[in-house]
Image: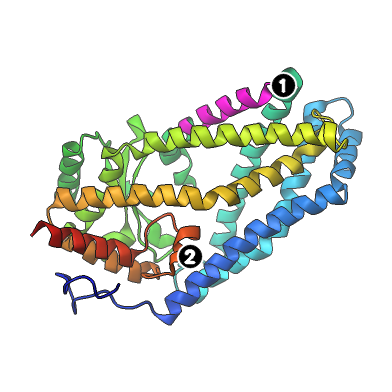
Amino acid sequence: MKQMIPQPAFPGDGGMPADSAEARRYNRLLRRVGVADFVLGLLLMGVILAADWTSAFRNFAVRVAGDHHSISLFLYTTILLLLTKVFSLGLDYYGFRIERRYHLSNQHLRDWAWDQTKAFALVFLFSQALVQIIYFLIRLQPSWWWVTAWALFMVFSVVMAQIAPVVLFPLFFRFRALNDEELTARLTRMSEKAGTRVRGVYEWLLSEKTKKANAALMGLGRTRRIVISDTLLSICNHDEIEAVLAHELGHHVHRHMVKGIAVQCGITFFGFWCLKLAIRWAAFGWRHYAQIDFANLPLMILVATALSVVLLPVMNAYARFNERQADLYAWKSVGSVRPFCSAMEKLATQNLSEREPSRWVEILFHSHPAIGRRVKAALVWENSRR
Ligand SMILES: [Zn+2]
């Protein structure tokens, strides 16, 4: 397979270097942490249900809050969130240690801990709001709560996609207007050619956190912007940056954001329907928790987590399909695959990515095709045009 392509028009010695043992080890560790995180989450909810700690938490919350339903729900959810955080803290810290060990993180423990605190605060806020709405709806519309909850959830997702670049990301990262007039003009021109109106090109000061490089087309409508990490700007020349942006614009041209929202619409509809089935079963089949009893929350979390595990390979396959479309757009619009290939090579090195993971690893875990395959596809495409 590897030798199928004629010697590539590729900078350097005419091919992608093989993955280092270091890159293999690093990615294996990351995968293990990801899997362990899922398993621990499922395990924790399973134990809380099986040992009926959930009833104990609910009784405690009701005792403290008395008749105030929303306050007791708030207390109960707080207990669950804190417990989950404490349970996963070890693994989170291990993830940070891995980034440090492989010299990818530029963060000190204190900065990392502060980011973790902010992230937890956001999760806390959003989870509390979601849970209050869900149990309010279950009381209001016992049969159809899940449809209303789903509709609200989708509205929330779209609003978040719009405001995230101006509200959420700045909580964790610093951005500033790109201080390179020539590049800014070039990228803006490209965006206009692709039919999107971007409201600015920004430098993403990612080097404060990590050595990894990244770029994106973020936001919707008025918050639409190009962001390029300083870590990318420091390793890539203008042609390469243009190739990376051309890929991002490929997502726009193929309307991946809108399609993604449509797919999410279908999947979350199915998900909420499963949640409805689960709590109905708990009430009438298992006869443990009435539908309006928020002690059934761990069951909902369990079902939602299990579903996302099952759907992950499907969603990843869909994402990889989109990535390939965006790549093709990039090669066509730039007219040469050279800058794309050299940018990919630099990104792989900088991010310690596996260029050639096993097929199974790619199918199960990767939202992007492996870089080795992307470069090969680019070279095959260019050769086919000759
Ligand atoms: Zn992409």
Q: Which mark identifies residue 381?
A: none
- In front of the other: 244 or 330: 330
Q: Which mark identifies residue 143?
A: 1
Q: Earlier in the sequence, mark 2 or mark 1?
A: 1
Q: Is residue 155 left or right of residue 186?
A: right
| Residue 29 position (above or below residue 74) | below
- Is residue 156 a member of the stretch shown in magenta? yes
Instruction: Specify few, some or many for label 1: CA neighbours under 10 Å numbering under 14, 14-19, or 20 or more.
Output: few
| Residue 150 position (above or below residue 208) | above
- Residue at horizontal 14%, vertical 59%? 384
For this orientation, the residue located farthest to the top is 140
User: Magenta residues, as a range?
Assistant: 142-158
State which quadrant residue 89 falls in: bottom right
Q: Which mark identifies residue 361?
A: 2
- Is residue 132 a member of the stretch shown in magenta? no
Instruction: Specify few, some or many for label 2: CA neighbours under 10 Å numbering under 14, 14-19, or 20 or more.
Output: few
- Quadrant containing the N terminus is bottom left
| Residue 76 position (above or below residue 104) | above
Indicate the amino acid at tag 1. Ser
Could you tell me if the residues under marks 2 and 1 are in contact, i.e. CB atoms within 8 Å? no
Answer yes or no: is residue 237 visible. Answer: no
Q: Secondary structure at mark 2?
A: helix
Q: Is residue 224 left or right of residue 362?
A: left
- Residue at horizontal 19%, vertical 53%? 331
Q: Is mark 2 within 8 Å of ligand 1?
A: no
- Residue at horizontal 29%, vertical 74%? 2
- Quadrant containing the C terminus is bottom left
- In front of the other: 322 or 37: 322
Image coordinates of residue 377 in percent, x first then y, are: 25, 61
